[in-house]
Image (cartoon, rainbow, N blue to C red):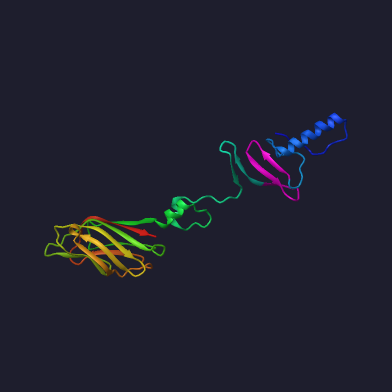
Amino acid sequence: MSQHDFDIANQTAPNSRADINLALKALASNSSGSVAPTTTYANMTYYNTATNILYKRNEADSAWITLGTIDETAGTFTPSGERALATQVQAEAGTDNTTLMTPLRTAQASKSHTLLGTLTTTSGSTQTLSGLSLSSYVYVFIKLDNVSHDFTASASTLRFGSGNIANSISNTNAVSGLIWLNLDNGQIISAVGAALTANLYGSSSGYNASSTSLSFSWTSGGFDSGSIKLYGVK
C-alpha cells in the first residue's frame, strides 16, 4: 500500500532516490490505501483497501469512476454495472429483460411449467378456472384426481370445454388421469376415465391461447369429489 504525489522535488541524491522509489511503489500498487490519494491525475487508478473497490480517475480529473470490486478471498473481480444472473423464477417467467441467462437457466426456461390453479370438484355442475393469460404457453397440462359425479339415474360424461374427456362414467366410479391441451389448435389428448379406460386423441376443446377461462362439467349431475390441477407449459 503506497500513495504519492508523483512530483520529485529538488533534493539530495539519497532523498531523490527514496522519493522515486515511493512514487514507483505507488504506481505498482495502484495508489492503494483506505482513502483516496490527495493528489490526483486524469486516468490514474486507485484501489481502496477498505472497500476492495478499484477506481479510475476521469479525463477531467474531477471524479472517480468505479471499475469494479475485488474479492480478495475468492480471487475474483466483479465489474461495475455487470448485469445480474437470472434466477430460476425469472427464467421460467420469461418477463425480465435485464438479467443474464446461463445454460442452466435457459434449459429451465424451455422446460418450465406453471401451476395455473386447482379446482376442487366436490360440488356444482360446472367448475371454471378464470382470469387466465395463456398467450405465453404452448400447452396446458391437466391432472385429474378422483373426479366423480352424483347423477344416479345413469352414466354421465365429463366434458372439458366442448370436448368429451371421459365417456359414460357411472356415479360409482371416479375419473383420474391426464389431459394435454394444444393451445395452437384447441386439440386435446387425454388418458382419463375410470381406471384410465377412456383415451381420446384429437378431440376439440374450443380453447386456444387467447382463452381466459377453462371449464369442466358433467353432461348429467354435478361434481361430488376430487380435484383438478392445471399447468401452463412453455
- Residue visible at 76% across and 47% down in the picture: 42
Side of 207 where 107 appears, left or right: right
Residue 46 colored in magenta in the image: yes
Q: Quadrant of the C terminus?
A: bottom left
- The image position of residue 99, as x and y in percent, is 52, 53
For this orientation, the residue located farthest to the left is 153
Side of 91 where 25 appears, left or right: right
- The image position of residue 38, as x and y in percent, is 76, 39
Of 27 and 94, the residue lying toward us = 27
Residue 58 colored in magenta in the image: yes
User: Hey, which quadrant is residue 35 in on the image?
Assistant: top right
- Residue visible at 30% across and 68% down in the picture: 187
User: Hey, which quadrant is residue 131 in on the image?
Assistant: bottom left
- Does residue 3 appear in the picture of this structure? no
- Residue visible at 66% across and 42% down in the picture: 54
User: Hey, which quadrant is residue 193 in on the image?
Assistant: bottom left
Q: Quadrant of the N terminus?
A: top right
Compared to residue 187, the image places residue 109 above or below, namely above
Of 47 and 61, the residue lying toward us = 47
- The image position of residue 49, as x and y in percent, is 65, 36
- The image position of residue 94, as x and y in percent, is 46, 58
Side of 232 where 153 appears, left or right: left
Which range is magenta?
Answer: 44-65
- Does residue 8 appear in the picture of this structure? yes
- How many discs appear? 0
